[in-house]
Amino acid sequence: MTRRRIRWTIFALFISAVGVLLWFYTRPKPIEVVVRPVERGTVERVVANTRAGTLKACRRASLSPSVGGQIAVLNIREGDEVKAGQLLLELWNKDLVAGVALAESEAQAAEARSQAACLQAEVAQREADRQVKLRKTGAASEERTDRAVTEAKALKADCKAAIASAKMSVAQAGVAKANLERTRLIAPFDGVIAEITGELNEYVTPSPPGIATPPAVELIDNTCFYVVAPIDEVDAPAVAVGMPARVSLDAFGDRRFEGKVRRIADYVLDIEKQARTVDVEVEFTNPEDIKQLLAGYSADVEVILDLRQDTLRIPTQAVLDGKRVFVYLPDDKLLEERTFESGISNWDYTEVVTGLQEGELIVISVDRAGVENGAHAVAAKEEP
C-alpha cells in the first residue's frame, strides 16, 4: 500500500512536471510595446492648412510699358536692387521727346503772346479812362471817347483769349509729356528685379485685351513676406485676426517661424467641390526671419487656437476613440485598458484632465497585434 501510494505520488509529480513544461514552452510570449510616461508640458489646439500654402511678397508688380516699341534703355539686371522712382526701362521715343520740346516752345510763345496782348489791353484801358475824363470837361468829342472805350474792351477780350490759348498750349505740352512717360517704366516701390523679359533693341508689345503676355519687368519687395494657405471651411470660424501661428517651410526642414494671422478671406474657395477652403494669411513676427526667404516657397501654417501650459499630457497616437488608452504595469508586466477624460489636443499631444496619473506608462504602439486588456507585455526599447 505504501509502495503504491509512492508510485502514484511519483506519477502525479511527473505529470505535473510535464504539464508545467508544456505550459512553459507553449504559453504565449509577452508582446513588446513602446511606452511613454504621462508627463507635464504644453498642449496646443491648432488648425492647419489642407493644402500647401505659398510664401508671397507683400508687394509684387508685373510691369510693362503701356505702348509697344523698341527697347532703347535697359540699365537693370535680374537681382538688382532699385529705388522707387528709378527708371527701369525706356523705349525708343526721340519723336516724342521732340514733340515735348515743340509743345513746350509753343506754350512759351503763347505765354509771351498773352503777356503782349494783356499789356496792349492795359494801355488801351488807360487811354479810354483819359478820354472819358476829357469828355466830362468837353475837351474830347463823344465819338473819340466811344472809340477809345470800345478799343479797350476789345483788347481786354484779346488778353483773355491769349491767356486761354496759353493755358491750352501748356495742356498740350502736358499731353505730350504723358505720351512720353508711357514709353518709360518707373519703379513704383523699392525692391529687387526678379525677372526681365526682353533685351536691348528688342521690340516690346503690350498685352491685348483678354490676352496675357509676360511682363517686361517683375519687381518684388523683399522686405516683407507673408504666407497664404487654405484651411477647411469647418475650421475657419475658429480663426481670428491676430492669433499666433507657426510657419514651416520645406526649404528649412524642421525649423519653425513665428507669425500671426493678418487676414482671413471674405469668401470660400470651391476649387475642390468636396473640400471647400478659406484662405488665411499669416505674417512673420520676427523681421530677421524674412532675410533668408524667397517668394514662391511652399509653406504650411498652424494657427494656435488654444494653449495649455504645465498640464498633464500623453502622445495623441496612444489615444483610442478619444478616451481610451492602454496602461503598462511594469510590476505585473500586464496591459490595463483605461478610460480617461481628455482636454485639448493636436497631432502630437492630448491633454489629460482626469483618469491618469503623472508617471504612468502609456502604450503608444497600439496598432501591434495582441495589444488588449490583460495581455502580457514587456516594454521595448523606447523609440527616439
Image: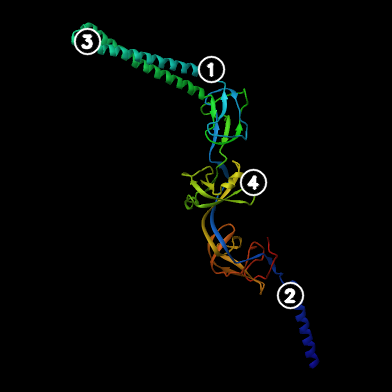
* Residue 188, placed above or below residue 69: below
The Cα atoms of the two marked residues, 1 and 4, are separated by 50 Å
Q: Mark 2 vs mark 3: which is more N-terminal?
A: 2
What mark, if any, has residue 370 been given in the picture? none
- For image coordinates 56% across by 68% down, the residue present is 339
| Mark in the foreground, 1 or 2 | 1
Question: Given this view, does label 1 or label 4 mark the residue nearer the observer?
Answer: 1
Q: Secondary structure at mark 4?
A: helix
Q: Residue 381: percent from the left, percent from the top?
A: 70, 65
Residue type at numbered disc 3: Leu
If you read the primary sequence from the N terminus, does the residue marked by circle 1 or circle 2 appear first? 2
Mark 3, residue position? 134
The residue at which mark 1 appears reads as 95
Distance of label 3 from label 1 (alpha carbons): 58 Å
Identify the element where label 3 is drawn: helix
Q: Residues within 10 Å of mark 3 (few under 14, many from 20)?
A: some
Which element carries disc 1, helix, strand or loop?
helix
| Mark closer to the observer (4, 3) | 3
Residue contact at pointers 3 and 1, CB within 8 angstroms: no
Using a 10 Å C-alpha cutoff, classify the residue at mark 1 as few (fewer than 14 neighbours), some (14 to 19) or many (20 or more). few
Residue 155 image offset from top left, x and y in percent: 32, 12
